Structure formats: C-alpha cells, structure tokens
C-alpha cells in the first residue's frame, strides 16, 4: 500500500514538473493566445446557455427543439408537450406557435435535456417551465418534441399581457407632463403626455370615466364629463396603452399601464383617449 502511494506521489511530482516545463517553453504571445482561446470558448458557452435551435423543419422557425445547456445541445421529449410550451419556444423568435409530437421532424439526434415540460405560456424560456430536471428523461429518440412557429397576429400580441406598471415607473416624473390637446377649449381634448421632448397620446383601450376623472383632477379641471375613444380632437403617436386607474388618484402618473413606447393599440386606427370636463 505504502509503495503504491509513493508511486502516485512520484508520478504526480513528475507530471507537475513536466507541466511546468511545458509552460516555460510557451512564449508570452503563445500563452496569451491560449488564454484568449479559452476565454472565447467560455464566453461562447455562456452566450449559448438556454439558446434554442429548431432542427429538421423546412425553415428555421419549425423543427425539433434543441436547447443548449451546460456546454451542449440536447433534445426535448414530447411527454406533456403542448401549445403553451410551443408558444414559449416560439416567443424566443418573437413568434407564436403550435406543438408537434413523436419526432415529426425526425428522431432526436442528441440526448434529451428536458422531459415532461409543463409551461404556462408566458415564460421567457422553457427552462423556466416545470420539467423533470436537466438530463432526466425516460424517452425514446422517437419522442422528440417540436414546434411550428408562426407570426403573431395583433390579437396574439394583446393576449401576451405584460405585468402592469405604474406610469411614473417608466416616465421621468421630473420632466413628464400632461395636457389636453386639440379641443375647442381647455376643458376638452385628447390626453397627451410629454416625455423626453415629445408629446404622445394614450391608446384608448379600456379608457373609462375612472381614468378620465383622474386626468381632470390632475389638471385641476374638476370632474370629468366624458371619457372618449375618438379622433375628434386629432391624434398623435400613441406612447402608452392599457392605462388603468382606481379613480381616486390625484395624478395620472400613479395609474397603471401595460405598454410604453412600442405600443400595440387595438381598435379603430387613429383613435386615442380623450376627455371632456364641464366648463365652470
Ligand atoms: Ca417522461
């Protein structure tokens, strides 16, 4: 036993010594090149983590699903695989989609990384869905999960509702401002907010007297008479959607909203949120 241990120690010492020699033989520039190569490899792995690739389809937007994890690509098993999961996968390409089963795009050519994937549909990545754990599966290679991704319609976009935020969380409250524009008097008009040098309108989705009354209180106009969804007072670029107030806020910027800047606004083109207040 002692002999064996001694043998191991001697071998290790020899290996260390020879490594040392190898290192010394490398020039500064060679060493730097090697370090850069390793760094690039690590960066690439980090960059790829969680990435999705669709294989075997007629375009890059359909095929069996492969996900990159811990340095390698792996397949996804079709147990529990459904359209909600497909929407999550396709969401990474800014699309929606449907699920395919049973290796519709061929057998899985890599080990399964994921099995029994259950998604709600709103996750950012399938790795956020429930599944059995990385590399744990009881699937045959014929059980590859796939997707067919398609462009989202306007309705799909509205359905992917993001968590509401208060307006003051996205606007710089110090420079933001509110006004009514396009009316015949100061007591009416389309609602506009000023932010970073521009005035913009509000999407009239769900625009009610609750919201209108907050606008009027904010502008010291008293009570609101009407909440209008119209182009009667003209329109400007819509910068906020889904504005929702309790009705008792003193300032519109305390109300919630869905989207800011890149806004998908359903309904009649050119229609914006407007209010009228009684003339005192
Ligand atoms: Ca399974």
Image (cartoon, helix red, strand yellow):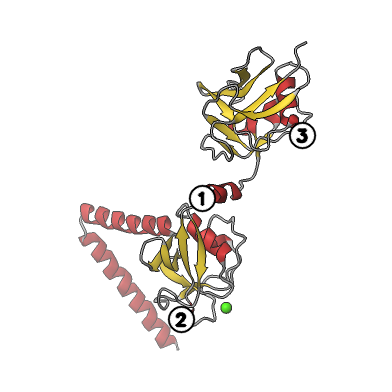
Q: Earlier in the sequence, mark 2 or mark 1?
A: 2
Calculate the distance from the C-alpha at mark 3 to the C-alpha at mark 1: 30 Å
Left or right: 153 with respect to 165? Answer: left
273, 72: nearer the viewer: 273
Seen in the picture, residue 155 relative to 34 is either above or below; the reply is above
Where does residue 180 sit, x and y in percent of width and height?
63, 19
Q: Is residue 263 visible?
A: yes
Q: Residues within 10 Å of mark 1 (few under 14, many from 20)?
A: few
Q: Position of residue 92 (x, y in %)?
A: 47, 55
Distance (Cα) linking label 2 and label 1: 32 Å
Secondary structure of the residue carrying numbered label 1: loop
Q: Residues within 10 Å of mark 2 (few under 14, many from 20)?
A: some
Left or right? Give the position of 23 relative to 247.
left
Q: Classify residue 104 by image quadrant.
A: bottom left
What residue sits 33% from the left and 59% below the top? 38
Callouts 2 and 3 close, C-beta under 8 Å: no
* Residue drawn 45% across the image and 89% down it: 1
Tag 3 residue? 246
* Ligand 1 falls in quadrant: bottom right
Numbered circle sitting on residue 153: 1
């Amino acid at each position: 036993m002692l002999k064996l241990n001694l043998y191991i120690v001697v071998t290790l010492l020899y290996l260390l010594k020879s490594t040392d020699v190898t290192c010394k033989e490398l020039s500064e520039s060679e060493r730097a090149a090697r370090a850069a190569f390793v760094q690039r490899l690590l960066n690439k792995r980090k960059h790829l983590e969680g990435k999705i690739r669709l294989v075997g389809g007629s375009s890059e937007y359909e095929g069996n699903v492969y996900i990159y994890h811990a340095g390698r690509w792996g397949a996804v098993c079709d147990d529990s695989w459904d359209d909600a999961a497909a929407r999550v996968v396709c969401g990474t390409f800014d699309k929606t989609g449907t699920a395919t089963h049973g290796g519709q795009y061929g057998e899985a050519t890599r080990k399964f990384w994921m099995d029994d994937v259950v998604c709600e549909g709103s996750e950012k990545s399938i790795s956020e869905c429930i599944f059995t754990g990385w590399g744990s599966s009881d699937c045959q290679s014929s059980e590859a999960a796939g997707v067919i991704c398609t462009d989202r319609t306007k309705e799909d976009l509205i359905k992917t509702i993001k968590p509401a935020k208060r307006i003051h969380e996205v606007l710089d409250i110090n420079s933001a401002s509110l006004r009514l524009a396009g009316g015949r008097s100061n007591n009416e008009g389309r609602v506009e907010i000023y932010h970073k040098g521009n005035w913009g309108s509000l999407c009239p989705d769900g625009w009610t007297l609750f919201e209108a009354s907050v606008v009027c209180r904010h502008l010291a106009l008293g009570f609101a008479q009407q909440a209008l969804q119209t182009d009667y007072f003209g329109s400007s670029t819509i910068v906020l959607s889904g504005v929702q107030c309790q009705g008792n806020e003193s300032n519109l910027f305390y109300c919630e909203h869905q989207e800011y800047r890149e806004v998908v606004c359903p309904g009649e083109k050119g229609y914006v949120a407007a209010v009228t207040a009684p003339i005192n």
